[in-house]
Amino acid sequence: MNALPDPKAQAAQAPGAAVFELIEVEKTFQIRPPGRRFTRETIGLKALDGVRLRVEKGTSLALVGESGSGKSTLLRVLLGLDAPTNGRALYHGRPIRDARAHGRDFARDVAMVYQDARGSLDPRMTIEALIAEPLRHFNIVPKDQIKSRVAELLNRVGLPTDAAKRYPAGLSGGQVRRVAIARALASEPSVLVADEAVSGLDVSTQAQLLTLLRRLQQDMGLTLVFITHDLGVASFLCEEIAIMYLGRIVETGPTDAVLNAPAHPYAAALRAAAPRFFEPMPEPLPGEIPSPLDLPKGCRFSTRCPAAQPDCQTRDPQLGRFGQARAVACLHPLASPET
């Protein structure tokens, strides 16, 4: 019988190689002007604007930002569902859309755990059939070994073997997320992408699932990209963090370094607005995100930034190196770069 993938063998693959690389990626959607429903005229809305990001093999990256920051659009570009309007989106050095369109390697290698885990599972199929589907589709194991492989995957995500005969409707929210993770792992991927995979659950269940994801990522040598709005989740789960604002990444680096000493005022504002145990609820981030159809001149965060200076109204900062392992897009960073 074929065993589950050898974690040491997967982890031994060459470290430091870029799995995903985004180079000046833009994504523009053509929409009708507000209040003009019946016109044929359209205007361009830049959901992504000059995004630069590198995800190395075996690392865990949290993509963080408020609603409207562009996380979902970036996710669709990473998965090859949307092509960039400009720039290059690469998977192992090859355009993502090409990798997705030709052959099954990309579909097998890059697995997705959706935010609506229950909605992603066919309610008419048993848990065994749902997990067995990718096993059959990608010919992972012979037919006579599918049932035992399903049992192994259920055990790996902390579900009893008898869960195989149940249906999604009979499972709790946390159990459904575990099934979605098991189904994602069935294709033996090297990359796991998760979109708000623990949102909407109670704190205890969230903690259990985050511990599971962290263990799986480390034991299997997975490259993990985790989309979240929760800095606490990002801090616990991921080694690296990328913070988005209005279609751009404004700060990247090791998670602990960025959260302990944020260089971009937006990162600092998110950190200050995060709730803490046994302390009063913090004030929400002041102001509202400007419309992407009417961006402020200069730095797009300048209208909400408590540290804005006159040149912030005229100069548009680009993401640049900040010390050895970080990058920031700010004219006046709050911290000093580490040497």
Image: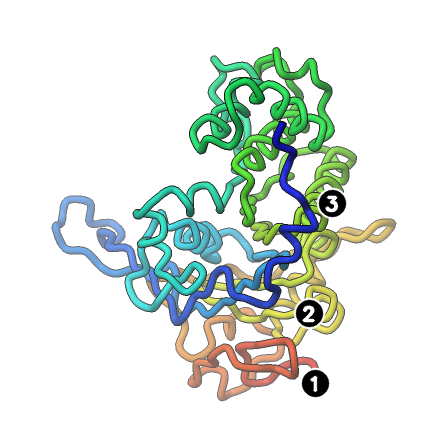
* 251 or 36: nearer the viewer: 251
Residue 111, placed above or below residue 149: below
Residue positioned 22% across, 51% down in the render: 32
Res 336 quadrant in image: bottom right
Mark linked to residue 215: 3
Residue positioned 46% across, 67% down in the render: 248
Mark 1 burial class by Cα count in 10 Å: few <14, some 14-19, many 20+: few
Q: Residue furthest front?
A: 1
Check the picture and name the quadrant holding the C terminus.
bottom right
Mark 2 burial class by Cα count in 10 Å: few <14, some 14-19, many 20+: many
Kindly identify which residue carries mark 2: 258
Secondary element type, mark 1: loop
Chain-order first, disc 3 or disc 1:
3
Horizontal side of residue 321 vs 292, given as left or right: right
Q: Position of residue 187 (x, y in %)?
A: 52, 36
Mark in the foreground, 2 or 3: 3
Mark 3 to mark 1 CA distance (whole Å): 33 Å
* 4 or 323: nearer the viewer: 4
Horizontal side of residue 306 vs 137, given as left or right: right
Residues tagged 1 and 2 counted as in contact (Cβ below 8 A): no
Chain-order first, disc 2 or disc 3:
3
